């Protein structure tokens, strides 16, 4: 198959545990681009946290951020898709999580908005050495109602995140999308938002058929795009659910799995 679009998750796929990019991965991406393959990033990260990696990898195609809620050009900043979380539902979720003492972040206008400073915020910011503006507003639910966020994220221990994600998915069924993006993170977005839906929209915009798309990921939030793509690949370090639905399992992020996949499915075809 002559693949024309490659979608890469960041954390756990393109980025290692130290938020580094293996030189072999960068070289393989450049080689794929030299053949005319379009390359995009599909991440839960906000746009401002994605652009530095896009620049590092010389990616000029639109990137998918916020679990698919945003598709935006990393060079010009032009927005092709932006789906916000309904304000009333975001406020309801924030109030429910607050009542259960779950630390929650609302992403509003490329800023992290929180009700108060807590250790969970410091823990989350370890994934963002590039720096992000943080706004503290004790009336977070009211702020989210007035200025609907692109997404919500909550931070807790893995067992609690698993429990709360399942509970929120049931409570907001059909009204919000709920997903785990990491063992420590659960997220809520507008209904229908996913990396898979955004990748389908981007491929259509670029005039690329589904069969010509490769998607690579490792966690629950990557499942929709792994399943949608013509060739869906799961990292060796991916969760079992990703291994189960992927067309193939490739080496882990620490083994430069993305470079291996590009060599195997793009450069040798």
Image (cartoon, rainbow, N blue to C red):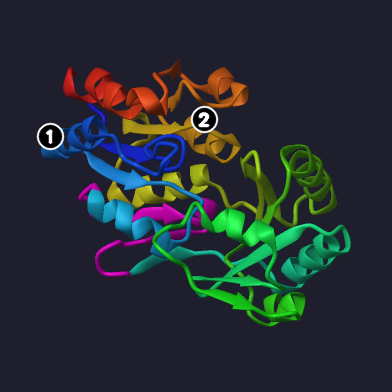
Front-lying residue, 70 or 220: 220
**Which numbered disc covers residue 35?**
1
Q: Position of residue 197 (x, y in %)?
A: 51, 46
Front-lying residue, 125 or 191: 125
Tell me the residue at 81%/41% (across/down): 163
Q: Residues within 10 Å of mark 2 (few under 14, many from 20)?
A: some
Picture mark count: 2
Q: Position of residue 122 (x, y in %)?
A: 59, 59
Tell me the residue at 43%/45% (across/down): 199
| Residue 209 placement: quadrant | top left
19 sits to left or right of 207:
right
Q: Is residue 142 above or below residue 86?
A: below
Q: Looking at the image, do the residues carrying marks 1 and 2 touch, with CB atoms under 8 Å apart?
A: no
Q: Is residue 87 above or below residue 177?
A: below
Q: CA distance from mark 1 to mark 2?
A: 25 Å
Q: Which residues are magenta?
A: 57-77
**Residue with the mark numbered 2:** 227
Q: Position of residue 171 (x, y in %)?
A: 85, 52
In this view, the residue farthest toward the left is: 34
Q: Is residue 193 above or below residue 238?
A: below
Tell me the residue at 63%/80% (across/down): 147
- For the question of whether residue 190 can be seen, the reply is no
């Amino acid at each position: 198959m002559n693949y024309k679009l490659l979608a890469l998750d960041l954390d756990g796929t393109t980025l290692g545990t130290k938020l580094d990019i293996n030189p072999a991965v960068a070289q393989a991406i450049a080689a794929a681009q030299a053949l005319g393959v379009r390359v995009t990033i599909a991440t839960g990260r906000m746009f401002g946290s994605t652009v530095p990696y896009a620049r590092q990898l010389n990616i000029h195609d639109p990137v998918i951020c916020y679990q698919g809620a945003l598709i935006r050009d990393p060079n010009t900043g032009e927005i092709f898709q932006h789906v916000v979380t309904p304000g009333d539902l975001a406020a309801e979720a924030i109030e429910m999580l607050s009542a259960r003492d779950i630390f929650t972040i609302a992403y509003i206008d490329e800023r992290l908005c929180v009700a108060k400073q807590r250790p969970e915020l410091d823990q989350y910011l370890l994934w963002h050495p590039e720096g992000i503006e943080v706004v503290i507003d004790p009336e977070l639910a009211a702020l989210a109602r007035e200025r609907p966020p692109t997404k919500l994220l909550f931070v807790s221990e893995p067992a609690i995140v698993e429990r709360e994600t399942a509970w929120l998915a049931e409570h907001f069924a059909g009204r919000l999308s709920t997903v785990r993006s990491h063992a420590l993170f659960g997220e809520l977005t507008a209904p229908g938002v996913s990396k898979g839906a955004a990748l389908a929209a981007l491929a259509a915009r670029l005039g690329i058929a589904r069969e010509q798309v490769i998607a690579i990921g490792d966690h629950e939030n990557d499942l929709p795009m792994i399943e949608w793509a013509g060739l869906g690949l799961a990292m060796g370090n991916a969760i079992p659910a990703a291994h189960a639905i992927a067309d193939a399992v490739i080496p882990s992020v620490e083994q430069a799995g993305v470079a291996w996949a590009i060599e195997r499915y793009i450069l040798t075809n």
